[in-house]
Amino acid sequence: MRENRSVRLSIQSSPECIVGKFRMYVAVWTPYGILRTSRNPETDTYILFNPWCEEDAVYLDGDKEREEYVLNDIGVIFYGDFNDIKSRSWSYGQFEDGILDACLYVMDKAQMDLSGRGNPIKVSRVGSAMVNAKDDEGVLVGSWDNIYAYGVPPSAWTGSVDILLEYQSTKSPVRYGQCWVFAGVFNTFLRCLGIPARVITNYFSAHDNDANLQMDIFLEEDGNVNSKLTKDSVWNYHCWNEAWMTRPDLPVGFGGWQAVDSTPQENSDGMYRCGPASVQAIKHGHICFQFDAPFVFAEVNSDLIYITAKKDGTHVVETVDTTHIGKLIVTKEVGGDGIKDITDTYKFQEGQEEERLALETALMYGAKKPLNIEGILKPRSDVDMNFDVENAVLGRDFKLTITFQNNSPRRYTLLAYLSGNIVFYTGVSKTEFKKETFEVTLEPLSFKREEVLIRAGEYMGQLLEQAYLHFFVTARVNESKDILAKQKSTVLTIPQLIIKVRGAKMVGSDMVVTVEFTNPLKETLRNVWIHLDGPGVIKPMRKMFREIQPSATIQWEEVCRPWVSGPRKLIASMTSDSLRHVYGELNLQIQRRPSA
């Protein structure tokens, strides 16, 4: 006992301690009995997973990796198309006021057993179910129908803070989210609790309704797509998460990054959740290891098969594309905003012996074999077809160029069909806006190009959340009856918000933030909402503008006082009735306040 009648105690929690909020009391045994301190919220203590502790199940070696996957409160999420990759910043905000309590509330809402709250496997699995509201009144309601009444369009969110705080305060699911929103919120949940995590984007992601590692696209005999028979869908991209942890429930070597997905796609053990599934196990085809590895394996490894459904009921396989699905898998690079290709962590290169062995292993462990299609795969046609879509800017005309190549000494004639569709990023078509048929004559050993003009008036007014246009070109070679088929998507380039600041970029000093937007379209934008966020710089806020006339410019100014020094970022988004997915961001270096 010191002279000031105080004593200093040190408490070291077990690496297996449950994660949560603990009330702290001091009890003293005296001759008069046990005296205990009264309840004081100021002494409440939070215990989290500790990736700096070698005995912890989430231990991650490497300061730069811990800085990125645990401490970084701003990330980058990639979207768009494989041929036109786009990115947007996301405010995870895991250190913002109230977020830790909100994340703990998510576990409470799930009625998660206290005994499991020290196990990152169980915590991440519960989180993957609770971030979506599909069957458990979780955090986010998903919507992919372009109707967002009584809620916020998914593209309007700039980060996770508003979503989690609203969920905790209202005790009701927040409207609305799509895959990148689910992934962003789930990343906040994981990092906030101390689990290293990152957001993943898989370009050309399979949603295999038959679970047979085969995406079947059925064609009519004239080359048109048979929408009644075509049940599988290929998402232009899909976002999920990876969480870092040991897997003592699996054989040695399958720890590390685990795929976890909170987007409600498939039911797992009675709930809409996915993972954790060992990425290493997925790569080697060991899909017998829990949880949900077969589904993730199919997302990155399915074959794309074009099948002609003949009028007599038989099916003929026209072409098989083994490289389309899982074309590119990426995440944000450590220490920067650039893109990191992690495709080789999920799959071996096509054609390698290891790739064949991984597929055989998956089949051995229960993956369904591809359906036995009637007929045989046709030999390769003498005619090749491909097409390119030039960069398309919202509100402007652009061209599509189709190339036909005759590789034989014979003369061929073709009947070609072009279909242009407004599609959701999930690959589901909403409206066909372009239909064109034309004949092509190919002399021996020659090629020919056909150009198709896509006018802005054909697609404007029908666009969905992410301004995706999908083109499907099929051609029938009259002499050989061969069917050629190709498909591509393009993302229209959308104007950006401009963010400016003036004043001292210093902790505790007033700084003026200006968000600016000029309407480039020939139509008036109505019901315009702008969202602004910046962890450590400004609290999330939003402002409505009734309308923006064509070529008109609007400005929004806010005064803020940064409270965190170092590299920071301001993020803004804009939505309206007819234009969404408009973003802007600004990197800042906030200085420390000079000491007196």
Image (cartoon, rainbow, N blue to C red):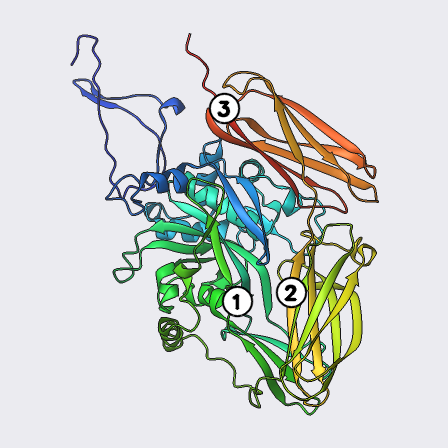
| Residue designated by label 2 | 488
| Label 1 Cα crowd, 10 Å radius (few <14 / some 14-19 / many 20+) | many
Q: Quadrant of the C terminus?
A: top left
Q: Quadrant of the N terminus?
A: top left
Left or right of 355, for residue 531: right
Q: Nearer the viewer, residue 67 or 105?
A: 67
Expressed as whole percent of the image width and height from the top left, the position of residue 465 reads 69, 51
Residue located 74% across and 77% down the image: 416
Residue 553 shows in this picture: yes
Tell me which numbered mark, 3 or 2, is placed earlier along the sequence: 2
Q: Nearer the viewer, residue 122 or 158?
A: 158
Q: Nearer the viewer, residue 165 or 479?
A: 479
Residue 325, label in figure: 1
| Residue 107 vertical placement versus 367 (above, below) | above
Tell me the distance, in whole angstroms, between the alpha carbons under discs 3 and 2: 43 Å
Q: Amino acid at mark 1?
A: Ile
| Residue designated by label 3 | 590
Left or right of 354, for residue 560: right
Expressed as whole percent of the image width and height from the top left, the position of residue 54 reads 24, 43
| Label 2 Cα crowd, 10 Å radius (few <14 / some 14-19 / many 20+) | some
